[in-house]
Image (cartoon, rainbow, N blue to C red):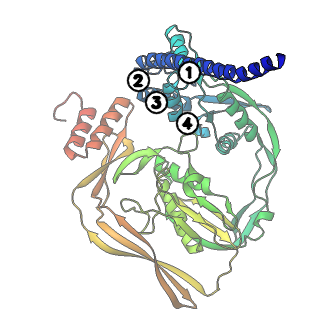
């Protein structure tokens, strides 16, 4: 009997297991439905609260973007970043003295602004509906405090440039070995050891400050001063024995903003050493175009017109260098003509610079180092390109500018000058609209062996040009005169001059 009961129990067990599984399935299904219902409830609640604006209590860096739409938040953060760029930081040298610089001068960047704004917009709208609802409720109660990190940094290279440029008189900076000509011979001047601010340490400290609860204001930080060897030594210049190419243009040295810019730009390029294969940007060597870096406002080309800009005149530096490089036969990687003809170079022999848009980029395609020297003398700027001469002694190069098309123009153009208001004078004749090409002609032992076109250039027409003075002790008068010049209407310009000089007389 006992045996039969055990068999019945064994037969019932599978029935119990199936029943339990069914019950478990029902429970799980109910749980899923319940959870799904809860999720759906909260998801609808989250959707009802989505008005397209960022939740209250959300910050991007130091910027409170509460209640903003994405476009508004983007503008707010970009505006803050622009403001950050103008903040001044003080570097206290351990040997005494202080150097100041703005973040902009040190290559300040804030990356991922759009991603940060998108993350701010999505906070409380993505992920678990329950979690999103909790975030929304916290925002409504004023208890949400969510900050999105905005990565910011400065450039170690630009920090180094600024600190070294402003260390003069505060530390004994190292002096690079250099090359020049003396009594017709190529001479290497030996380097000198010195000391310099620790740019790497300064950049690291500054980047740490920017990304650790920075309040958006300039601060002061201490900088070590280290014994520093020069970057270029006499040994580096051992193979620099010959003058490969040279070119000179006249710029005036009259103390104007333009002449100051030519001098500053040339000195920033002076002393450049290029190893074989090195590629160099003239714009990178000369920038930034700021007062602190030795530049002033002066006339320059912009969109086929002449306007006052910081660094106006640096194109004469790049043009002079371009021609010296041509004679040295270095590889020209990038070169652009001006929009209009310039007075200091023949067509197709100019090289324009325009921030990061137009540049002169060149490469040392030789087997030995190349050294670039800039000389300023009696209103002339000269570039000498030194290296090791390996060309045939009988090799001679000529460059010939050929105008292929020309179309005359009429009218007048008016450009602002640094003269006092009342100055109105003819500056230059009109230039036609032309197309040009530059030929490179190579001779060996006075026999022509090649003739090739190395660039093509197009220039828009430039009418007869007059200079108009804008200087005044009254900033409002200067502004008024500049606005008149922008009209490019001769009557408006002359009437404005009369209104400023003779305010109480209708017919001076």
Disc 3 and disc 2: Cα gap in Å? 14 Å
Could you tell which of marks 1 and 2 lies nearer the N-terminus? 1
| Camera-side residue of 292 and 6 | 6
User: Do callouts 4 and 1 mark residues in contact (Cβ within 8 Å)?
Assistant: no
Q: Would you say residue 477 is visible in this rendering?
A: yes
Q: Position of residue 132 (x, y in %)?
A: 53, 19
Secondary element under disc 3, as helix, strand or loop, is helix
Residue at numbered disc 1: 29
Disc 1 and disc 3: Cα gap in Å? 46 Å
Q: Position of residue 137 (x, y in %)?
A: 51, 11
Secondary element under disc 1, as helix, strand or loop, is helix
Tell me the quarter of the image containing the C terminus: top left
Residue at numbered disc 2: 52
Secondary element under disc 2, as helix, strand or loop, is loop
Disc 4 and disc 1: Cα gap in Å? 44 Å
Nearer mark to the viewer, of 4 and 2: 2
Q: Is residue 210 left or right of residue 508?
A: right
Q: Indicate whether 7 appears above or below 336.
A: above
Could you tell which of marks 4 and 2 lies nearer the N-terminus? 2
Q: Residues within 10 Å of mark 4 (few under 14, many from 20)?
A: few
Q: Is residue 90 left or right of residue 479?
A: right
Q: Residues within 10 Å of mark 3 (few under 14, many from 20)?
A: many
Residue at numbered disc 4: 112
| Camera-side residue of 426 and 443 | 443
């Amino acid at each position: 009997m006992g045996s039969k009961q055990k068999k019945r129990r064994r037969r019932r067990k599978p029935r119990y297991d199936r029943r339990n599984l069914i019950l478990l399935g029902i429970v799980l299904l109910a749980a899923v439905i319940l959870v799904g219902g809860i999720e759906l409830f909260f998801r609808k609640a989250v959707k009802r609260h989505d008005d397209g604006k960022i939740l209250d209590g959300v910050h991007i860096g130091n910027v409170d973007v509460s209640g903003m739409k994405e476009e508004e938040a983007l503008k707010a953060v970009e505006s803050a970043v622009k403001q950050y760029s103008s903040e001044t930081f003080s570097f206290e040298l351990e040997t005494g003295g202080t150097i100041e610089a703005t973040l902009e001068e040190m290559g300040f960047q804030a990356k991922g602004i759009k991603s940060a704004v998108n993350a701010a917009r999505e906070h409380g709208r993505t992920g678990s509906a329950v979690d999103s609802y909790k975030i929304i409720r916290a925002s409504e109660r004023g208890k949400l405090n969510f900050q999105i990190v905005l990565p910011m940094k400065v450039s170690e290279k630009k920090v180094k440039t600024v600190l070294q440029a402003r260390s003069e008189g505060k530390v004994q900076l190292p002096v690079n070995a250099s090359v020049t000509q003396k009594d017709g011979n190529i001479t290497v001047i030996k380097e000198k050891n010195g000391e310099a601010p620790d740019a790497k340490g300064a950049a690291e400290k500054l980047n740490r400050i920017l990304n650790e609860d920075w309040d958006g204001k300039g601060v002061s930080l201490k900088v070590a001063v280290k014994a520093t060897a020069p970057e270029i030594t006499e040994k580096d210049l051992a193979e620099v024995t010959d003058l490969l190419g040279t070119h000179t243009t006249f710029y005036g040295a009259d103390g104007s903003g333009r002449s100051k810019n030519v001098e500053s730009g040339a000195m920033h390029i002076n002393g450049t050493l290029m190893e074989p294969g090195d590629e160099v940007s003239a714009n990178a060597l000369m920038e930034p175009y700021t007062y602190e870096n030795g530049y002033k406002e002066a006339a320059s080309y912009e969109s086929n017109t002449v306007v006052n800009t910081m660094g106006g005149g640096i194109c004469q530096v790049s043009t002079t260098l371009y021609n010296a490089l041509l004679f040295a036969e270095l590889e020209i990687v990038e070169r652009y003509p001006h929009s209009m003809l310039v007075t200091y170079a023949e067509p197709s022999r100019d090289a324009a610079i325009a921030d990061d848009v137009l540049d002169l980029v060149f490469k040392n395609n030789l087997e030995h180092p190349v050294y670039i020297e800039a000389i300023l003398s009696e209103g002339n700027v000269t570039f000498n390109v030194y290296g090791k001469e390996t060309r045939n002694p009988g090799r001679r190069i000529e460059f010939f500018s050929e105008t292929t098309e020309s179309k005359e123009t009429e009218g007048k153009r008016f450009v602002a000058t640094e003269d006092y208001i009342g100055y109105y004078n003819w500056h230059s004749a009109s230039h036609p609209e032309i197309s040009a090409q530059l030929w490179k002609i190579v001779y060996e032992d006075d026999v022509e062996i090649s003739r090739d076109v190395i660039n093509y250039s197009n220039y828009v027409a430039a009418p007869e040009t007059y200079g108009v003075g804008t200087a005044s002790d009254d900033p409002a008068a200067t502004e008024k005169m500049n606005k008149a010049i922008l009209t490019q209407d001769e009557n408006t310009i002359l009437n404005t001059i009369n209104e400023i000089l003779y305010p109480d007389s209708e017919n001076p």
